[in-house]
Amino acid sequence: MTSSTADQLNPAAPEAGTLRNEDAAAPTWLWVAGVAVVLPALIPVVALVGRVIGASDAAWDALVSARTAQLLARSIFFALVVTMTATSLGVAAAWITTRTDIRYSRVWSTLLALPLVIPSYVLALSFISFAGPRGLFADSTGVSLPSISGFWGAAVVLALATYPYVYLVVRSTIVRIDPSLEEAARGLGSSAAEAFRRITLPQLRPAIAASSLLVALYTLSDFGAVSLMRVDVFTRVIYAQYQGRIDRTPAAVLSLVLMLIAVTILWGESRSRGRSVYFASQAPRPPTRLGLAPRQRTAAHAFLSITVGLGLALPVLVLVAWLLRGLTTGGVIDMRWGAVLGSLSGSVAAGLLAMIAAVPVAVLAVRHRGRISRALRATVYAIFSLPHIAVALAVVFFASRYLGGLYQSFVLLAFVYATLFLAQASGATEAALTQINPSLEEAARGLGDNRLQVFRRITLPLILRGLMAGGALVFLTTMKELPATLLLRPTGFDTLAVRVWSTANELSYARAAAPALLLLIVSAVPMYYLIIRPRQRV
Amino acid sequence: MTSPTELQTEPAARGIHCHKVNKAFGEARALRDFELEASGSTVISLLGPSGCGKTTALRMIAGFERPDSGTVAIGEDIVAGPDVFIPPEERRVGMVFQDYALFPHMTVAQNVGYGADEAGVARALALVGLEGYRKRMPHELSGGEQQRVALARALAPGPTAVLLDEPFSNLDATLRDRMRREVRTILKGAGTTTIFVTHDQEDAFAMADVVAVMRGGEVLQVASAIELYRHPVSPWVAGFVGESDVFAGTAVVGSVETALGTFPHASPLRGGVLVMVRPEWVHPSPAIDGAAIVVEQEFFGHDQLLVLELDGTRLRSRVGHVPGLGIGDRVDVGIDELVLFPEGAT
């Protein structure tokens, strides 16, 4: 078509894809909505900063010390260990269940996702009440095991509690990848493992980055498991400072340090991800599953069994055993229906509020990339990553002074829940939105709809599943929430999480068993229908 | 398919006019003083290599990008210019996207009816010959069917103009040939002004009444396919729209002297020039003392491609069977047609 002469005269024109000017296009009202959703969440942070700036010299001396440096190192290392473990578990589980010919892959898929419904402190409780002093094992055999509490025990517990986030996100992405890409790599001489590493893994990178970020932030803000297993990371130390001292400023100072760590992680994540936007379409056909050799099959089964065994079977069996012991020895079932009602009402309100707030944040983050939308998104993630105890403290300071009647009200508590977990709703919505090719929305505009009409007729129906999954995540997380509830609940308001916590603190494992099991059941039902089942049908 | 007149819009409302349009994305200048005039039921093609700004031009007309300067008018209305920007939904321009952008959660009828009433849907589906496909979902359609649905969706509201972005790039060669004809028939039937973007000269030649060749954000030449092929404005355009060879010559009134001989021409150029010929314009005839030698021969059945060499100048010749001609033979060179460019032209 082109002549050699012309080619010599004209070195190839620069290759470029379609350029889109995305920053310029966002209308003012969308920015207003995005900022309006995020701004109230910043108030507690401002209150916290104000408190720290006005702090006494003694508080600053407490901050700048070897003990703080040690605390910092321990917390970061802890989060790193948990994140790497959870990510490896999640990716491996997703790959085995989608890309190998392992039997009962559907059953495994469900089982692998289920640990998500077990709160980290319930998992910790089950580990301690099984293997710890006065635990089931010591009780029935008389042999006391080496202590399960501490750094590594807590790391295992948190990795098991968080890997399902990675697993679910990666799994739903992996099934959308066109299998012919991997086949092309195989045809070019790559082994199955190499093709996965060089072709599939890079395509999964946004999913892995997003979900492991979620894990890291979850770990940093986890309070229940680390305090039960006595690991002195930031959250536990902050709580101790708050409880043990009349001057609460040191707690505020440490909270601010923790916030800075979270912001740093976010910054690193956004740098590593760069500008990659994937318009993944649906996979045209299911992939050919890799045939496992007998040894590999045994290894895969062992891996899945251990993961599901520790993350799901152990806690359920231990709790049931304690419940039975309680029944047979003293007939103790400590059940309060008020706690059930409290958990449900708080979680439903939080989920709905978060879904509404997630939409402007996600649309700005995906469709109108730029400094402001990045800042909004980073703020949402930073708030999610804050130790809830710190946010609760800040809200206590702020609400008791300025909000009068709202202080210790259900409305305020629901808003705090939604604010804390907004990142889960907006993250899921962003993921769904990223899957939608912007040309769909442009096509609709070209056909005569304005932005709002396009959102209602095209965008919303297509992201609805992601939005609801995000709402469900918020629902579940609120169900398990502990420290914010402890500090902000209205008088007489009770939740299952608070029941489990208070009874476990009294070392009455048998009393903790019934509310803990009920917590599992109520969060398992929506979890299964909203998150696990739709993803299996893909 | 129904009669061509049913979807026709008012002639006065037709036409696209772009004047001195500039657009930059950061450092990258996508369009430089972009000019385009399209009116009536003309099918006009923006042809150029990837990155030449053709898609940006299309998105600018559709309203998905705002020009930095210059004006865009649709019919008699200025839709983009100083202090004017009409949003895409008010431009009455139908756009067919490269990946079709069919709404995955809607049936064919719902897709086509997105911007139109039931009568528009019926007419558009009839026009593309998909009346029986109303209840299908987009993923149940073949590539060619998806394209026709996308076209029907763009035509259903009775747009002033239809814009197509690389409409055939997702189709295989056989389907591509068929769809070119079908799409042209449909668009001519609808009677709208059509602008379509492509990097493929065959697409442009087969579909368009008028081709605008673009490079580096600029329109280099606007002409019919034949004009473009026979009278390109530069060696680059010549090479982009077909096979071409360029060699040096010296022009005098009425003729040009080259190493291959002296040939007549009608150009006003004098002195040192570049001579451009296409392989089918070059005719070798065996001659024992011929000036050129056959150095390569590629046989295609209906014709053959010969590479002729003289004093280091190589040019190609596409001819039928020439008895007794093979590699190493000396030939005289006859040239039917040639195009002259000023020396140093690119």
Image (spheres, coloured by chain):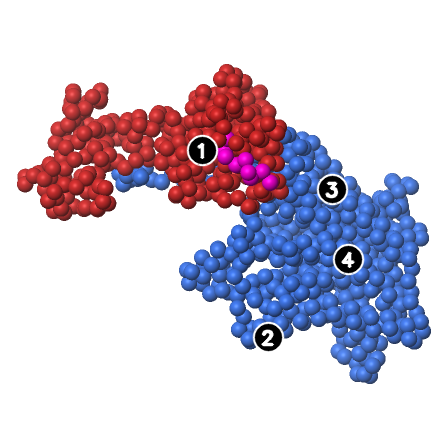
Chain colours: A blue, B red
Instruction: Tell me the number on the disc at residue B183.
Output: 1
Dot 3 falls on a residue whose secondary structure is helix
Between circles 1 and 4, the one closer to the viewer is 1
Number of marks drawn: 4
Name the quadrant of the C terminus of chain A: bottom right
Against B288, residue B207 (above or below) is above
- Residue at mark 1 to residue at mark 4: CA–CA distance: 52 Å
- Residue at mark 1 to residue at mark 3: CA–CA distance: 45 Å
- Check if residue A381 falls in the magenta segment: no
Residue at image mark 2: A298
Dot 1 falls on a residue whose secondary structure is helix
Q: Locate residue B238: give its quadrant.
A: top left
The image position of residue B257, as x and y in percent, is: 14, 28
Between circles 1 and 3, the one closer to the viewer is 1
In this view, which residue lies farthest toward the left? B288
Q: Is residue A264 visible?
A: yes
- The answer to the question of whether label 4 and label 2 lie on touching residues, with beta carbons closer than 8 A, is no
Residue at image mark 4: A525
Q: Residues within 10 Å of mark 2 (few under 14, many from 20)?
A: few
For marks 3 and 4 on the same chain, the one whose residue lies earlier in the sequence: 3
Q: Amino acid at mark 3?
A: Ala
For marks 3 and 2 on the same chain, the one whose residue lies earlier in the sequence: 2
Q: Amino acid at mark 1?
A: Val
Q: Residues within 10 Å of mark 4 (few under 14, many from 20)?
A: few
- Residue at mark 3 to residue at mark 4: CA–CA distance: 24 Å
Magenta region, residue range = B127-135
